[in-house]
Amino acid sequence: MDAEPILKADIGTIYDGSISLRQFCVNFGVTVQGVVPAETSPDADRNTDFSGNTTYLEAYLDRITLETSRTILKTCMQAFPNAILVRPVLDKNFKLREFVEVTADVTDDGVWLIDGATCTGDIRTSPTQYVLPTEGQLQVRLQCDLWKWPRPKYSSRGCELASQDLRRKLIVAGLQGMPKNDEVAFSNFRIATQFPTSDTSARAQLTNLRGALKNVLPETGLKQVRLDTNQVVATFIRPLDQVLRQWCKSGSDRWLEVTRESRDGPWLGVCPE
């Protein structure tokens, strides 16, 4: 904190974190007392590799229901049939104690799919980073809050205000406070991994997984409707959880979202065409 900075620059994506001293030296062609220092901690192995030798994949699948999250998890396991699925067990300080093998019926919020390992003993670990990159392994982080908390977590004052203004009951997906027969929960499904850019096999497997996930979340036509006049003001195509599509179609005034673009603007609802 008391040091005088010699360079301040944005390198990498927003919220990417810090660069290690070794990476700074390698990328800017400088040394410390004539040498390029080694990484000081195994945790540093999780720092972003800015050289281009490592490819990073991080995807957030939006509005995923509990039912579909299970399908996605099984699809990922089918894409890597020789992989093991493990979950972290933490100690009282929230640091990694061990990994245990699990099935697709996990109830934690996050697991790791490790391709290239036959048992948990093959996984290099760190108390804070959990899994460390290992040659010959593809390590895929899979996370969905609904595995642990399968109920809707949030309520929306906006939905309540819209119902009052329009004098009709609006049902919105993913919210607390909806009638029990109309309630449905969703969350993001996160997929994250990294692999050597030269590893064409890993790239091919992940490309195949992408194709399989497109079948689980097919592109679906959506419409934005002005709720006071029922006028369609926009249409667009997005990948959509088909459980949510069926949910919208199975009842009246069910919407994926209800918003308005300004304080005095009309209320707008989005639903499948």
Image: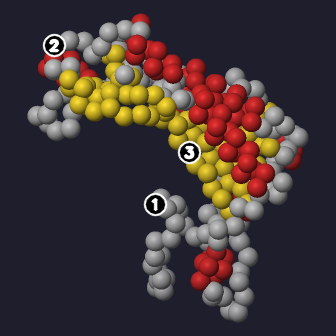
The picture places residue 145, in percent across and down from the top left corner, at 54, 31
Quarter of the rendering containing residue 248: top left
The picture places residue 59, in percent across and down from the top left corner, at 56, 45
| Sequence-wise first label, 2 or 1 | 1
The residue type indicated by label 1 comes to Ile
Q: How crowded is mark 2: few (under 14 residues within 10 Å), some or many (20 or more)?
A: few
Residue that protrudes farthest toward the bottom in the picture: 34
Q: Which mark is residue 5?
A: none
On the image, numbered disc 2 is attached to which residue?
167
Kindly indicate whether the residue at mark 1 contacts the one at mark 2 (C-beta within 8 angstroms). Answer: no
Q: Which residue is drawn at 63% across and 63% down?
A: 47
Question: Is 68 on the left or on the right of 114, as rendered?
Answer: left
Mark 2 → mark 1, Cα distance in angstroms: 43 Å
User: Considering only vertical position in the picture, is 111 above or below 135?
Assistant: above
On the image, numbered disc 1 is attached to which residue?
14
Mark 3 → mark 2, Cα distance in angstroms: 39 Å
| Disc 2 secondary structure class | loop
User: Considering only vertical position in the picture, is 124 above or below 264?
Assistant: below
| Disc 3 secondary structure class | strand
Q: Which residue is drawn at 39% across and 23% down?
A: 272
Quarter of the rendering containing residue 208: top right
Question: Is 48 on the left or on the right of 240, as rendered?
Answer: right
Q: Which residue is drawn at 70% across and 28% down?
A: 74
The picture places residue 197, in percent across and down from the top left corner, at 71, 61
The residue type indicated by label 2 comes to Arg
